[in-house]
Image (tube, helix red, strand yellow):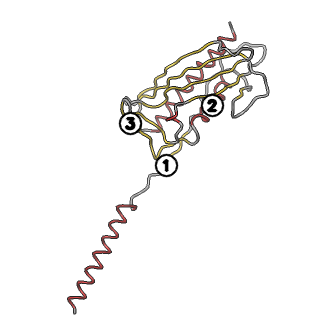
Amino acid sequence: MLTSNYSILKLVFSTLMLVIFLAACSGGGTKIATKYYLIDPVEHDALNVTLDKPLAIEIIDVHIPQYLERFHIATRVGENRLKFSESNQWGENLRKNLMRTLSRNLSRLLSTQDIGTPLNRSSSLPDYRVQLYIEQFEPGIDNMVRLAARWQISATDTLEPLAIYNEELLGAAIEQDNYEQMVTSMRQLFGELSMKIAESILAEENK
């Protein structure tokens, strides 16, 4: 009888230890907290703008590749392969974030408050319209962020673009999987691109 009870207790104990072990393996680990990021405007000084009145600018749209529409931040881990981070994500839709940031950057650079976007319409008739196409905006396998973009500028009174521009910018090397550095580099590069867009608008105005 004692032997039988001992066998039962041994079986119960073994079963209990197995349940505890499986629970630890499946859900007992520490969950990594998700970090959320935004690309904020940069503190540029205004360009040397000598105009009779501030320009009115309309940002028609900012286009980004579909793979960047995801909230999970993308990096390249091979020539034709991407990785999306579960624990590092954008705080909002990246296209909308970039559109609002471009608006604020241009406002500072061109010394004007009259910047219209699909997110924030302006009642003014724009002097110039800008449409931006981003073709690449993520770190490569060399841990350098690349920003490849083109944009076109058009006037209010014509459907044809006045000019089309292309630019490819390269950031400094960052530590692998260091998302703080990555987003900082992206912010700086997008600030540089905003500067070039502002300069192209002034070039059209001064023709």
| Residue 145 location (% of width, % of height) | 45, 28
Q: Quadrant of residue 14?
A: bottom left
Between circles 2 and 3, the one closer to the viewer is 2
Mark 1 neighbour density, 10 Å: few (under 14) some (14–19) many (20 or more):
few
Q: Quadrant of residue 16?
A: bottom left
Kindly identify which residue carries mark 1. Answer: 34
CA separation, marks 2 and 3?
28 Å
The picture places residue 48, in percent across and down from the top left corner, at 67, 14
- Of residue 109 and residue 56, the one placed in the foreground of this image is 56
| Three-letter amino acid code at the position of disc 1 | Thr
Q: Which mark is residue 42?
A: none
Q: Which tag, 1 or 2, sits closer to the chain's start?
A: 1
Circle 3: residue type: Gln
Q: Residue at x 52, y 18 (%)?
A: 167
**Are circles 2 and 3 on residues that touch, CB within 8 Å?**
no
Q: Earlier in the sequence, mark 2 or mark 3?
A: 2
**Which dot, 1 or 2, sits closer to the camera?**
2
Q: In screen coordinates, is 14 left or right of 113?
A: left
How far separated are the C-alphas under marks 1 and 3? 18 Å
Residue placed at 47% from the left, 31% from the top? 138
Estimate how packed mark 2 is, as few (under 14), some (14 to 19) or many (20 or more) residues with alpha carbons within 10 Å.
many
In the rendered structure, which amino acid carries the disc numbered 2?
Met
Quadrant showing the C terminus: top right
Between marks 1 and 2, how big is the CA–CA gap? 24 Å
Sequence-first tag of 1 and 3: 1
Q: Which residue is mark 2?
A: 99
Q: Residue 176 has which mark?
A: 3
Question: The N terminus is located in which quarter?
Answer: bottom left
The kind of secondary structure element at disc 3 is loop
Q: Is residue 97 above or below residue 130?
A: below
- Residue for point 61% across, 19% down: 197
